[in-house]
């Protein structure tokens, strides 16, 4: 048994990346089997069909972390990583906005300190 106390409720054959099985530098190993379980953690396993190796185990907490941390820090949506110039442009744009915000905040703070 791959996940103790439960059987798979769904088995999907992935032929293209999904939101959790991806590679920011290109395409991940495909095809891949995704087994979804009905355990309390809602575990998903990614299995290489050629070797039978379990390559990733992702539960509900890890999927939430992917959206709360990875997406907001890496901007690695599959649609962006598969269209690399769009991803590069977005990263440059957000970096420039962040730099302008930081510099303007420092400038306003410096002006206020000099007055007070």
Image: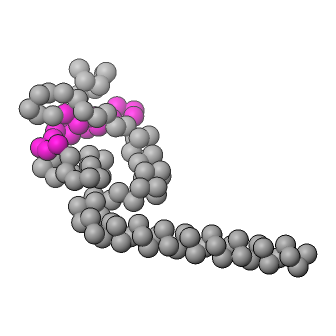
Asked if the stretch drawn in magenta spans residue 22, the answer is no
Q: Residue at x 14, y 27 (%)?
A: 52
Name the one closer to the observer, 83 or 59.
83
| Residue 50, picture quadrant | top left
Q: Is residue 25 left or right of residue 105?
A: left
Q: Position of residue 68 (x, y in %)?
A: 47, 52
Residue extending furthest left?
50
Name the one closer to the observer, 2 or 25.
25
Q: Position of residue 5 (x, y in %)?
A: 31, 22
Asked if the stretch drawn in magenta spans residue 36, the answer is yes
| Residue 63, picture quadrant | top left
The residue range painted magenta reads 29-47
Q: Residue at x 85, y 72 (%)?
A: 113
Q: Is residue 42 left or right of residue 32?
A: right
Q: Residue at x 16, y 39 (%)?
A: 33
Q: Quadrant of the N terminus?
A: top left
Q: Position of residue 13 (x, y in %)?
A: 13, 44
Q: Residue at x 17, y 43 (%)?
A: 29
Q: In the rendered view, would you say 67 is above or below 34? A: below
């Amino acid at each position: 048994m791959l996940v103790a106390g439960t059987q798979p409720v769904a088995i999907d054959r992935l032929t293209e990346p999904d939101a959790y099985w991806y590679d920011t530098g290109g395409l991940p190993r495909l095809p891949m089997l995704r087994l979804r379980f009905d355990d309390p953690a809602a575990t998903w396993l990614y299995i290489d069909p050629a070797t039978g190796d379990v390559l990733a185990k992702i539960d509900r907490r890890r999927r939430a972390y992917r959206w709360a941390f990875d997406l907001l820090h890496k901007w690695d949506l599959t649609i962006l990583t598969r269209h690399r110039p769009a991803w590069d442009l977005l990263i440059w744009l957000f970096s420039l906005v962040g730099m302008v915000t930081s510099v303007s905040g420092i400038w306003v703070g410096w002006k206020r300190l000099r007055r007070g």
